[in-house]
Image (cartoon, rainbow, N blue to C red):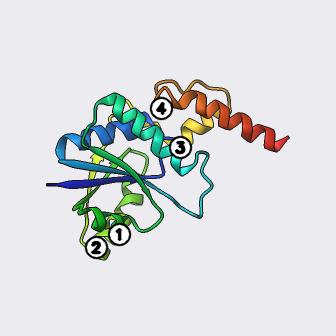
């Protein structure tokens, strides 16, 4: 059985993330989508919320060979634990390759885990979690950039964020 891991912060998960995950699910027997918890970052959504949203979105997409989990440790440790031989990362045209290449080389050195880069769908390559949050913060419509269930969650999180500033 071939197992792949698609890691990310997914704060929030975007249509681009889901595209890469769904495409990966066609190539591998099992794909683990792993919400990587980074203590140095303050996410908008909790780890549990991110995991649940991804599960919900992938269930709607009919991805039955995808497992959604989270980890606080090295992604290579997670890969070893589940028997994954490859990490899948989506690449946009905005410099993702340079950022991801270093991590890919470290992961191969640490654990012999290879990284497969999938090019982003050109229709979705401009979308990132950061851009989604920025657009939403300024009152823009993020429909289609994220799963439908994320749109009201973003509005609620931003309202709470705004109240804290006041």
Indicate which label's residue lies in the foreground, 3 or 4.
Answer: 3
* Residue 122 shows in the view: no
Indicate which label's residue lies in the foreground, 1 or 2.
Answer: 1
Residue under numbered circle 2: 111
Q: Quadrant of residue 55?
A: top left
Q: Secondary structure at mark 3?
A: helix
| Left or right of 80 in this view: 34 | right
Q: First in sequence, mark 3 or 1: give its number.
A: 3
Q: Secondary structure at mark 2?
A: helix
| Marks 3 and 4 in Cβ contact (< 8 Å) | no
Q: First in sequence, mark 4 or 2: give its number.
A: 2
| Marks 1 and 2 in Cβ contact (< 8 Å) | yes
| Left or right of 143 in this view: 65 | left
Q: Give the Cα separation between the discs numbered 3 and 1.
A: 23 Å
What percent of the width, then of the height, locates residue 19?
33, 36
Which label was assigned to residue 93? none
| The N terminus lies in quadrant | bottom left
Report the front residue among 61 and 89: 61
Q: Secondary structure at mark 4?
A: loop
Residue under numbered circle 3: 49
Q: First in sequence, mark 1 or 2: give its number.
A: 1
Indicate which label's residue lies in the foreground, 3 or 1.
Answer: 3
Query: Are there few (<14), some (14-19), or many (20+) residues within 10 Å of tag 2?
Result: some
Residue under numbered circle 4: 146
Please say if 153 is above or below 79.
Answer: above
Q: Residue at x 59, y 58 (%)?
A: 41
* Residue 97 shows in the view: yes
What percent of the width, then of the height, locates residue 52?
47, 41
Q: Residue at x 17, y 44 (%)?
A: 27
Residue under numbered circle 1: 77
| The C terminus lies in quadrant | top right
Q: Give the Cα separation between the discs numbered 3 and 2.
A: 29 Å
């Amino acid at each position: 059985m071939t197992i792949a891991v698609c890691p990310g912060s997914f704060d929030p998960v975007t249509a681009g993330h889901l595209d890469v995950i769904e495409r990966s699910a066609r190539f591998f027997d099992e794909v683990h989508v792993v919400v990587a918890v980074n203590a140095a970052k303050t996410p908008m959504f909790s780890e549990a919320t991110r995991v649940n949203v991804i599960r919900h979105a992938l269930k709607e997409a009919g991805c039955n060979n995808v497992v959604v989990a989270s980890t606080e440790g090295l992604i290579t440790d997670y890969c070893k634990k589940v028997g994954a031989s490859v990490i899948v990362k989506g690449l946009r045209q905005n410099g993702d390759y340079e950022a991801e290449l270093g991590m890919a080389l470290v992961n191969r050195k640490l654990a012999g885990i290879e990284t497969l880069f999938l090019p982003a769908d050109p229709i979705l390559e401009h979308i990132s979690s950061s851009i989604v949050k920025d657009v939403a913060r300024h009152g823009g419509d993020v429909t289609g950039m994220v799963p439908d269930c994320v749109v009201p969650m973003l509005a609620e999180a931003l309202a709470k964020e705004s109240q804290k500033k006041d």
